[in-house]
Amino acid sequence: MFDGDELFDATPRAYQMINADTRDISSWEKLIGLLRPAFPLVEARIGELTEDGDFSLDAEDGASRIDAEIRRGILRLTIAELVTPDDATPLDGFALNALTDKLDILHRIVDDAPLLVWRQNAENKVSWANGSYMALCRDVGVTQEITTWPLPTVFRDLEVPKLMKTDGMHRISITVEHDKKKLWFECVSQPIENDTLYFALPADRLVTAETTLREFVQTLSKTFADLPIGLAIFDCDRLLALFNPALTDLTTLEPGFLATRPSLYTFLDTLREKQRMPEPKDYKAWRRGISDLETAAVNGTYQENWSLPTGQTYRVTGQPHPDGAVAFLFEDISAEISLTRNFRSELELLQDVVDNMEEAVAVFSPGGTLLLTNNTYADLWKSQPDATLNETSIVDATREWQDLCHPSPIWGDARDFVSGDRERAEWDGVVELNEGGHLLCRVAPLTGNTTMITFRQIADVPQGEETTLQSAVTAIR
């Protein structure tokens, strides 16, 4: 007995039937949900009842019957005893209790499932839903009461016919009213009689991960686009998977060709045709060597400088990537090579100039290491500093000089001048060789706290002249 939607009274058997549905909905909704499969027209017939009206309705399978009447606003429903077909035995109490317990377990499982489950009819009206769907209705702030029938339709933009014609998961979303947050779900449909059963699994974390990945890829793409180094990444099947604009500029390969995902062999063959790699002397041997190149790149050991017929020089580096992929980096180092060659040429020119000087020259670093000498120095001191692997210090050099000369305080002054940090001014002095003859030794500071010491042979000092340093220098001048 119902007074509107409120259960007014019931028999124990009716209470047991209604309470078998454990969902958080009204007793009226529970009862209608139980009766609808056997009595599809029960709602419509009840809605047609007038004051003090009544009707009787047989179940579609003929196994049960409903008698309904309204008296003074109170609806009384009488449900006939459930029986099996004529050729079967009635259901006993134990079997009914077992079915009731099983139904209760199934209701709990479906109702507490962490995914949405609901049923929609051909008019897109929700005829049944589980607890997660009801909770979503409250979260999104639907205006319709969730205790009335039919239940509110949360996903209003869900196209049932279109979804039923396709297979697999479909992503749907709904916006929460109070904070405008969008909730995402992966939805799949299943036809059931004339209705459609939907399952929607929360996909917020998946959407967030995909968005983060997409933003990360976009950031990488922008970074790669601005790199002056050409990048070509080949997947585990050695097909071009990723490239940047700099690669097209350096290799002159068309973006359309690169977009076709050529293989590594095709990529290198095309580079050879466009003269963007060194021309191999033995092409067949070079083709066989590509496998060695690939292996070296996978091991992270491939690096070569390609001198192109155009005069440019590329540094090509192979680097391994996860899942068997390999990346090749193409860098134009023509300017660097040209600068290195010019610098080397200038050094060679400087060395030639120094070697043609009549004076013996020695240049020392601020730390006292011998940086530069010339041929005259090697002839004078019978020394080849470049022939030794060890560095020659100012101490080593003055020891060699001292061995071939008479004792002189000049050597100590030279050591102090090279390694000292006091104010430095050019000075000179005369030393006498053991084999005879004199040398004018000049010590001069250079830029960067380096020091140049030169030796020039001079005529012998006149007999009878004072041998002090100043008198010797005066006599030479």
Image: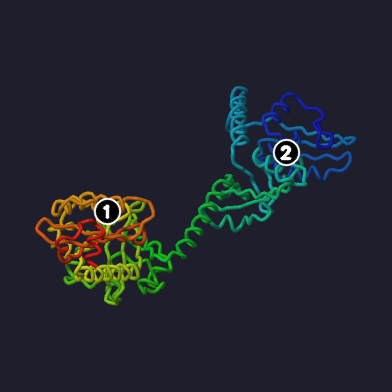
Indicate whether 336 appears above or below 25: below
Q: Quadrant of the N terminus?
A: top right
Q: Position of residue 286 (x, y in %)?
A: 20, 67
Indicate whether 65 appears above or below 418: above
Left or right of 128 on screen, residue 352: left
Q: Which residue is mark 1?
A: 414
Frontmost of labels 2 and 1 is: 1
What amino acid is at disc 2?
Answer: Ile
What amino acid is at disc 1?
Answer: Ala
Q: Quadrant of the C terminus?
A: bottom left
Q: Report the front residue among 390 and 328.
A: 390
Left or right of 454 on screen, residue 251: right
Question: Callout 1: few (<14), some (14-19), or many (20+) C-alpha neighbours within 10 Å?
Answer: many
Residue 64 in sight in this render: yes
Q: Position of residue 209 (x, y in %)?
A: 53, 49
SS at badge 1: helix
> Which quadrant would residue 269 be assigned to in this image?
bottom left
Mark 2 or mark 1, earlier in chain: 2
SS at badge 2: helix
Seen at 9% across and 58% down, the residue is 435
Q: Which residue is mark 2?
A: 32
Total numbered circles: 2
Q: Report the front residue among 182 and 445.
A: 445
